[in-house]
Image: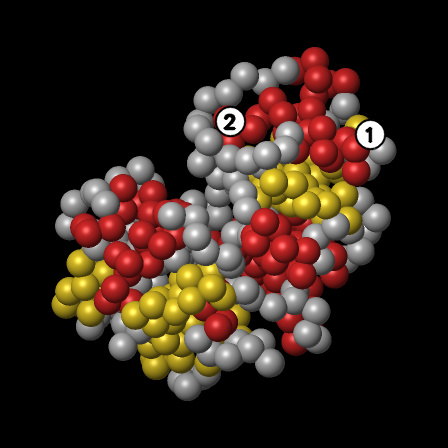
Amino acid sequence: MYAITIPEPGGPETLVWTKVPDPVPGAGEVLVEVVAGAVNRADIMQRQGFYDPPPGASPYPGLECSGRITALGPGVTGWAVGDEVCALLVGGGYAERVAVPVGQLLPVPEGIGLKEAAALPEVVCTVWSNVFMVAHLRPGETLLVHGGSSGIGTMAIQLAKAVGARVAVTAGTKEKLERCAELGADILINYREQDFVAELERATDGAGADVVLDNMGAKYLDRNVKALAVNGRLAIIGMQGGVKGELNIGALLGKRAAISATSLRARPPAEKTAIVAAVREHVWPLIEGGHVRPVVDREIPMRDAADAHRFVESSGHIGKVLLIAP
């Protein structure tokens, strides 16, 4: 088969479409013929040499895909050759075929195309696990989403609105904020022109956000704590703004607030299986009911993954960028 490889860390030009050995499904795995994958920030970090795959994982980038099952490994039940699926991966999505543990498989939701389904697994599992399973967002509460026009952001807006929460977002352009509003965002903050702490305080009559979903890390740490409501929860899922910041423990104590920091890729298989099961139970009905949909900016041939990385790194996209297999 062919896959995108990374012979050495560097810029997008280091991504090479080349022939590699076919994967073989092990016990409890299926082989999926990939129809589409999707670009995530973690893929860019891996290409740059900052985010190596866990031991034993595929060396190729790609944390989600959609396609058809072509073979079953020993002990697999409940799935059949020919089933159309999407999958949460530990790696290997930028390829023609990938072996997937059955606990990380999801059926393609009714009403969603097979290619489009590749935009779902990573963002849905990230948002549901952090915003709902860890931070316990409840109806009537306020969620602040940084990067509201990203793949994660567009999904977080829709899921929060679906459960009856109020949503505030930050984004860097008028166009991106308008798209967030179309998805249901209530409070729109241009982070290039406005202070999100002050804007959120004004919009919530001083209460702040019950949950903050943050992809920036160190750069926003202090302001995120200031933006929290009493008993608020800060969920950190990225480090685009650095890895080391100063935390005001007094402010955290004063608000009786909590901070969680998680990554999805490195979680043990049992945890991923539990997250995927929760997503299938709670999110798939929302998708099939038309309340939530993946937002896809564009489709790019998988062999041109370098172009996809350049586009995502430019931050010109809204939602997800898909890689279409040959």
In screen coordinates, is 264 left or right of 47?
A: right
Residue 298's image quarter?
A: bottom left
Q: Secondary structure at mark 2?
A: helix
**50 above or below 178?**
above
Does residue 207 show up? no
**31 above or below 245?**
below
Asked whether the residues under the numbered discs 1 and 2 touch, taking CB atoms below 8 Å apart as contact, a structural biologist would say no
**Residue 70 spot, x, y in % from top left:** 34, 81
Badge 1 or badge 2: first in the primary sequence: 1
Q: Residue furthest bottom?
A: 82
Kindly identify which residue carries mark 2. Answer: 219
Nearest the viewer among 280 and 231 is 231
Q: Mark 1 is on which residue type?
A: Gly
In screen coordinates, is 170 left or right of 307?
A: right
Residue at 63% across, 25% down: 223
For residue 206, which numbered disc appears in the image? 1
Residue at 67% across, 61% down: 182
Q: Residues within 10 Å of mark 2 (few under 14, many from 20)?
A: some
Q: Secondary structure at mark 1?
A: loop
